[in-house]
Amino acid sequence: MRVSSTYLTAIMTRSFERNSGKISKIIEQQSTGKRVNLPSDDPIASSQLVNLQRENSVLKQFQSNISRLQTSLSQQETVVTAINQQTDAIIDDLLSAANASHSRADMGSFAHSIDGKIESVIAALNQKNEDNHALFGGTLSDIQPIVFDAKTQQYRYQGNDQTRETTVANGINIKENTLMSGVFSKAGSDLEVLNQLTALSSKMKNSKIVPSSYLAELQSAHEMMLQASKKLGATFTDLGGRQNRLSMLAEAHTDIATSNSQAMDELANSNPAQASTDLNLYKMSIQASGMTYMKISQLSLFNYMS
């Protein structure tokens, strides 16, 4: 079958264009260092890359949530530590005061010491974070959790007992806030322990009242504060447990993100050695095709006539 010169030229032109396109693509890959620059370069790899990138984006959000929550829980733990120290100091004062040998003046001194520590506890319970939100008001973080009612001469809790949660992994939420009003509650009444302690302090400062008349109250207050101390211990355990879970999840997310990044590199990055070899092969193919075309185009029937 005779092949026309026009048809041959068209075939060779398409071959040159195809190989030139391959060369351009390889040069682009060498320039960017990426094997997949467009979805059409490798549809399957491109789909896998999109999935891995989406997963890493979700992991990044989880890591951000974890970091923010770790900061908040660490701050809460610091404040709870301060409250615990003041609670222990009040326990010591009550134990020392529960002695019939003390004078009324001595009791007044103990009372002033206890008052100062109660004020420190209240200040800590009203602590705010860097966003000016109350740490221990439940979900009502925009108001001061504890106020002093001048009419009743008692502290009153204005927050609630609801919690907030943050998503830190697929299907895993961790509580953001710590409920503290119950630490000093009694018989279901928030802050009853501190209110009874404040009332007792008023008696201790009253020089007209004989100390022996409220020794039983001192012992009762001592027991109440010991119970509060136990509740604080449980709060520490809860805070520590949440922070440990966050640390483990953060490490797991980091490992997965690192693995995903490595997989993306393997899918997307070009192999310099392979790219160089392919480039040389396509160049040689173009050169060979060009030489073949030149030789064929120079042939005619006269070459076969003797």
Image (tube, rainbow, N blue to C red):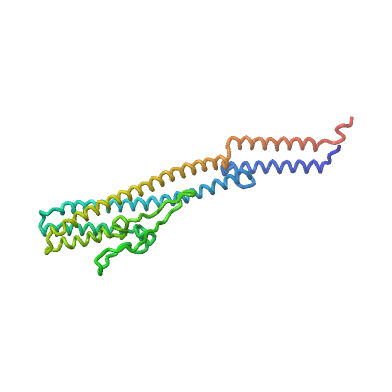
Q: Residue at x 14, y 63 (%)?
A: 206
Q: Where residue 281 sits: x, y (%)?
A: 66, 35
Q: Residue at x 29, y 60 (%)?
A: 191
Q: Where residue 117 sits: x, y (%)?
A: 22, 57
Give the left or right position of residue 133, taking residue 170 as reference. Answer: left
- Tell which of 288 and 254 is nearer to you: 254
Quadrant where the N terminus is found in the figure: top right
Quadrant where the C terminus is found in the figure: top right
Give the left or right position of residue 157, taking residue 222 as reference. Answer: right
Give the left or right position of residue 302, taking residue 169 as reference. Answer: right
In the image, residue 149 above or below residue 89: below
Q: Residue furthest bottom?
A: 151
- Tell which of 228 and 48 is nearer to you: 228
Q: Where residue 173 sits: x, y (%)?
A: 45, 51
The answer to whether residue 86 is visible is: no
In the image, residue 207 above or below residue 176: below
The answer to whether residue 301 is visible is: yes
Q: Residue at x 67, y 43 (%)?
A: 21
Please identify the quarter of the rendering in which residue 123 is found. Answer: bottom left
Q: Where residue 160 sits: x, y (%)?
A: 37, 61
Q: Residue furthest top?
A: 306
How many numbered discs sit on the rendered protein?
A: 0
